[in-house]
Image: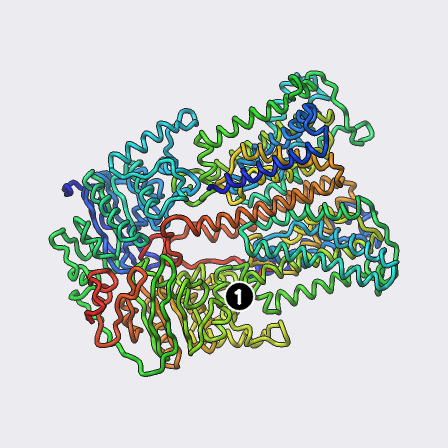
Amino acid sequence: MKQDTIRKFVSLGLLLILLVVFSLTSEYFLTPANIFTLLREASIIGIVSIGVTFCIITAGTDFSTGANVALVSMICANFLYYTGLPVFIVLLIGVLSGAAAGCVNGFLVARLRLPDFIATLSTQGVFRGLTFVFAIRSATGVISNKVITNPDFLLLNGDIGGLYYSTIAFFVLAVIGQLVLKRTKLGTYTYAVGADRKASEFSGINIGRVKIAAFLISGICSAVGGIFLFAKLGSAIPDLGIGLEFDVIAAVVVGGCAFSGGRGDVFGSVLGSVFLVVLVNGLYKLQMHVSYQLIIKGAIIILMTIFDSVYMDLMSKYSRGKSPRAGEAVSGGAQ
Amino acid sequence: MSSRIVALRMEHIDKSFAGIPVLKDVSFEIYKGEVHALMGENGAGKSTLIKILTGIYSKDNGRILLNGQEVKITSRTDAKRNGISVIYQELSLIPTLSVTQNILLGDEICKKGIVDGKAMRKRVMEIMDTYSLHVNPDAIVETLSIAQRQMVEILKALAFQSSVIIMDEPTSSLSTSETELLLKIIRSLSRQGVSILYISHRLEEVYEVSDRLTVLKDGVKVAVLEKEEIEPKKVIELMIGKGIDETVVEAEMRKSCQPVVLELKNLSKKDVFEDVSFSAHRGEVLGISGLVGSGRTELLRCIYGIDRLDNGQVIFEGQVMKSNVSHNIREGFGFVPEDRRKQGFVPMLSVCKNIALVSYDNIKRRGPFVAGKEEMSLSRQGIEKLDIRPNNPHLPVGNLSGGNQQKVVLGKWMVRDLKLLLIDEPTVGIDVGVKEELYKFIEALAAGGSTVLIVTSDLKELLRVSHRIIVMRKGKIFKEFNTGSVTQENVLEAASGIEKECAADE
Amino acid sequence: MSKMMAKGFAKKFAKPLILLAMVVVMSILQPKAFPTLNNFVSIVYAISLYGIMVCGAIYPMLLAGVDLSIGSVAAMSGCATVMTIIKYDYSGKGVFLGIAFGLLLCIIVGLVHGLIAANFNVPPFLITLASLNLVYGVAQLVTNFKTIGCVGPPIFSVIGVGRLWGLPAPVYILAFCTICSYLLLRHTVFGRQLYAVGGNKEAAALSGINVKLVTVIAYILSSVCAGIAGIVLASMNQQAVATSAKGYEADVLTAIVVGGTSLMGGEGSIQGALFGALLVGLLNNGLRLMSVPSTYHLLIKGICIIIAVAFDIRSKRSDDKKTEGKPLFKVKTSAGGMN
């Protein structure tokens, strides 16, 4: 069985167990209100995780998502506060700035050849710093977390019969993301680059472009998620989204993506986001110490990535037929 | 049956590396629908020629013409676009994608970026039907066997409408039945007008399937044989060069009277080698010959202890050896690996540190500390003994020439009390002068009482240094030469399958 | 002077010159605040902490890995030490037990990192990132978000606050750690093996080096040095809290990379890394004096890492460019590279 299929089954199983346990121990758990709230939270992590899924499938990562969320929110806040531009335009600007951030990441990785994790860890600092630069300040220069009261903007918080817009957006984007991944040329190339970089090169795939596309998608997803988060909070605080990147990566890992690349998909990350949110919410309802979240998330990431490594090792050992001989399989054969 | 229309022609190709000519005025053509074998010893230039055809190397001189038109090829994708595909041993498939996706990778059928899965599948099925080559189009490549993956590679080449498919040692990892299937496919492809350039040392296959055959020797094209002219002994003669101003290279095998120090009993490793048993004596140089895929390198690695055996025992000086490299090194083992760049030395470290790398138990001082002076004098010993140039022990080994790098690799063993040295292809890419030096070192080692096991594809080299020669084929010991005189032809015949199973025939 | 001589001169003196230039610039920009004794003392304290962590964090990086968890590990060890001291009523015995316990925890964490990195195909940045959060969570849990004050006993305070001949104790601890690391890297078998594994893992394994053991020890050393820094920090601040060393890994990483250690392993030295620590310490100090808020620091440091790593990668790539056939391979040794 494929690695990501097994992992999805395991995660789904764990999720079901969690749902059962939590609904038994807390009577408020399975109420519609709670479910919709849960989904709303999952949407924000989830929307961002759609983009990060692309990055991880290319055997890369994106650690700048949290900072990107904050930056986009701050930029939107500035436009909403200082200008009278229609909300729709402001949101567009926000998404574009998220895309620009993604391009920066793409440039660092594709052109300057920085390793993904260093590039995005650095841009995390840069974007977070820029958020502070753009922070709305009062006359004395102190950061004032101005609450945005623009009613058109606050529409984003609306819902249809309880189901929040953000959740709808999440599922729509997830479907689009999955289709792009599975049905487009870009999606095929994304998997190819992650699974075997060399072979992709030989087949004429432009690796740089695929990486840049992945970061672009991640940047846009961070922007959309960030906008919903901003709308939910009502004000753009510079600390927005701290720790989000870790949650997003946890969601993608739980969803079955392997860091070695070439495996996993968006639906898995949807599962992972829901799982994470249910876990956190359940722990909270069980009144467990809030630090357990970090501990459990960290442990899950470690355990699942170890599993991936072991499983794929076993798979390659038992693959049908003979494998190319170790020492003598020199490319180009005999001289 | 092939036509006489020239599909691919290479004219007056020259290529030199750092002043050393590797291809000299090579002209060569393949007809449409022909299966053409390219033969030659290691170092003859076959690999270089192929790399020029696929754009990995650039030619110094000459032209490449496809269907009469001159083409410029600077990359593998260039070559593909021009209709030349190459199938190497290390296949270039994406393991997590399906067969269909792999076959049409880079050439997907899509509308505005959206892939038309149905149309792609249909196209793939069409190709499979046209060439009678079927693999499950929805299977994920990593679940397929090597033979099946090769077929996917072939289909990929066909999807790109390649007029010339180059196959480099395609059968070295295949079983007998898989090989037969492949040859059948090759014949069918040629009937369809696809030209196949077939490179292999497995002469029996070559004879079975080729329409014509070109022999390269030392960078020069020495002959082109038509099917009727293809005769095993003749080809080997041409490859090795008897009769063209060359003295016959012949060696006398000597059975040793010294005691046996190394005994291999029924060594087996699944799918790699089986039931290998032989022994080696003190002071003996035992040459191990065989084609790519015969299991020689793996055998050596298992003896050394870096890879595990499935079965069998390695007994050295009466002791059963385990798969523990540092223990074996202490017992006097040494290993010169096949790829010196990737496995032999640490490029960023100095000559001194590389030479001392395995000898720290000898140059420790007060616990974990290294005695710097002794380390340096040890390395100078090595530099002197092997005449490493430049003789500055502080230079990073990555900056030395290939020959001197190999000397460093050898040097780290030769400054020790070596009892058994395992060598794998020691002189690849090394110039003649240094080669000769290395042979002298090996001889000196043996004379001093060490045992040497040397794996090499260079037949001259094999005959030059070996006291006895063992030939492996498809993972088994096929023949042992331990008396009388042996020529390169003898070895090649044994290794490449001209001689049928004939253990009794000695 | 010929071009070669000029290059050699530049290489040898580049680092001290850069430091000198920074000191001069900052004295000019902040003539009242920068060149004061108090300020230098605070710089010294900061650099001591980074420096101690650098002494350990360099090991995984020489193996082409990384340890992102050092900030959390430092905090954890500080908390563990302080809580043990308090439990044993501020006695001398408590101090010894506390330090031993704190360091023991670090050894365990490092052991886990090393075992995973050695035996599984999991990227070290991921392991240590997960660990960063996990350990942080444990520290939060155990301290319940509280700051644990610890004034004394004198045996403990002397670590962070004590002075000898005018210099603060942490400097001596830094000196000790630096000397140990220097000796370890340059003069022991382990050091030789470490560079070999980092430079060419396969060749090292074929030379009988126990690659797994080397990996495990490297990560243990990294965690232990982080632990030592955490204990010094707790003593300095006379308190321990889960967030005490939050974000330190960024500075330490920057210091090591700027100091010439390659992310791809096999190249780097303690001297270089310490130079990097000095640089980062001065930079932090300067930014603070100029009232630049702490998040701009992230911005600037982020850019610094990018530049340093980009240069490192470019110099390696120009060697790897598609050269044909069997030519000479040129290895560029940057200043501070081990030879």
Q: Quadrant of residue B73?
A: top left
Q: Against B410, is A42 above or below? A: above
Q: Is residue B182 left or right of residue A31?
A: left
Q: Position of residue B21 (x, y in %)?
A: 29, 58
Q: What secondary structure is marked by label 1?
A: loop
Residue plotted at (68% across, 38% down): A243
Percent position (x, y) of residue C288? 77, 44
Question: What amino acid is labelled 1 in the image?
Answer: Ile
Q: Which residue is mark 1?
A: C209
Q: Is residue C144 above or below residue C114?
A: above
A227, above or below B13, in the image: above
Residue under the point 51% across and 30% down? A178
Q: Is residue A159 above or below residue B157?
A: above
Badge count: 1
Name the image colouring.
Answer: rainbow
Instruction: Say which residue appears at 70% left-offset and 54% top-offset.
Output: C277
Based on the displayed image, in which of its 4 quarters is residue B129 positioned?
Answer: top left
> Mark 1 falls within which chain?
C
Image-quadrant location for residue B488: bottom left
Residue C45 visible (yes or no): no
- Which is nearer the eye, C218 or C92? C92
